[in-house]
Amino acid sequence: MTDTTTPKALWRRNLHILWFCSFIVGMAFSEIVPFLSLYVNSMGTFTKAQLTTYSGIVYAANFLVGAVTAPLWGMLADHTGRKLMLLRTSLGIAIAMGLMGLVTNVWQLVGLRALQGLFSGYIPTAQALIASQVPREHSGAALSTLMTGGTSGNLLGPVIGGVLAQFFSIRMTFFVTAGLLLITFLLSLFCVHEDFQPVKPEPATSANAPTPVSSTKRLLGSRLIFILLSSTMIVQFGNSSITPIISLYVKQLMHNVGPITIVSGIVVALPGISNILAAPRFGQYGDQHGSGKVLIAGYILGALVYFPQGFVTGVVMLGILRFLVGFADGALFPEIQTLLTKNAPASLTATVFSWNQSFHSVGSTLGAVIGGLIAAVFNYNAVFIFTALLMLSNFALIWWGAPEIRRNSPKTSQPK
């Protein structure tokens, strides 16, 4: 009989379970998001301007609240345990999702989306738990593998959500999503194990005894950590600037003729497919040869594949370039998280991952808004060019602002 109590067996077992839970969470969220505007439209008679405005508020409510509250939950996780936070977020979001299926007006939906943001953070907390258990020499591969769980769920979710909405109703999709999240809660409760040892405080006589606030200030005061968190925001800003307009761009390239929604769905899914294929391999390479090399390559590839998307004349070429975007994302997000893991104090693992989620949420919100404005003032292709320039600016920030990354010399052991 296999011993599941050893540290090696524990983190591998948790990795498998949390991969599946992240898959369910990713699927649950992507079941809902593509149809939020349709759900809003079903609650009244709105002009086009009203519908887009209300849909934007509904979309942003979750991210705005999550950006503010995520660091607070992260600090709490570092002092009470990451498993407890997994239970909080999965149960809380399940309740919020179930209630969304009962709303009768837009503002009720906005309030529940904000409540969802209050309880958000399952996947970052799962990453923090694995990061706190996995040996440093395997952290890149483990975190990259875990990220493919949520990505896989994001690919499947819109298909399931579309089928449910087509044959039942959008309201039914919320109830099914709540049920999936309850399964995640039960798996986290009974199958995830954490031997959590809270950090012992310094003696009361010490005038320099660290507090959660002072520890967080010290964390964010690190130039390297702040640059990595800012990089998460910039990369997600670029991704989110494209999300609202990609189907409209496909429609333009197809000259309003043909199965536009099906083709758009395929184009949207392509980066996720390549991400799943690439991320674990990039993580393994980073563990062996340096995460900095992979990160730098990701920025160069990102700029190279985003820029020509603004000049394509057919949907096939757009699909090829979108497929390559997944390789860039597979080299960026996991390696940023790996470098955060290797350069943050072990006692603040959940805190740094929650701040990473907060920066991610800010990037999502700003990217969607500013991307829409750029498309309105210029055209859809300008959004892709702008995103390519963002990748180059982030590359410059890493190259000159954190030279230890390109030199592959960030610390690989945790500071006290």
Image (tube, rainbow, N blue to C red):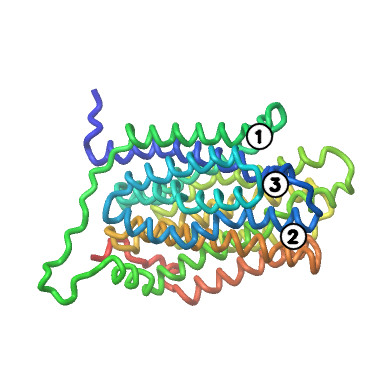
| Mark sitting earlier along the chain (3/2) | 3
> Is there any visible trace of residue 13 in the rendered image?
no
Camera-nearest residue between 160 and 379: 160
Q: Is residue 398 above or below residue 116?
A: below
Residue 7 shown left or right of residue 310 in the figure: left
- x and y, in percent, of residue 349 in the image: 33, 57
Crowding at dot 1, Cα within 10 Å, few <14 / some 14-19 / many 20+, comes out as some
Residue at 44% x, 59% y: name it: 69
| Near-viewer residue (402 or 264) | 264
Q: State the residue position of label 1.
A: 159
> From the viewer's perspective, is residue 31 above or below residue 244?
above
What residue did someone put label 2 on? 308
Disc 3 versus disc 2: distance between alpha carbons?
35 Å
Rounded to the nearest whole Å, what is the CA distance between mark 1 and mark 2? 29 Å
User: Amino acid type of disc 2?
Assistant: Pro
- List x then y, in percent, for residue 217: 34, 72
State how many labels appear.
3
Q: Nearer the viewer, mark 3 or mark 1?
A: 3
- Whether the residues at callouts 1 and 2 have beta carbons within 8 Å, the answer is no
Within-10-Å neighbours for mark 2: few <14, some 14–19, many 20+: some
Residue underneath mark 3? 40
Of badges 3 and 2, the one in the foreground is 3
Label 3, label 1: how many angstroms apart (C-alpha)? 20 Å
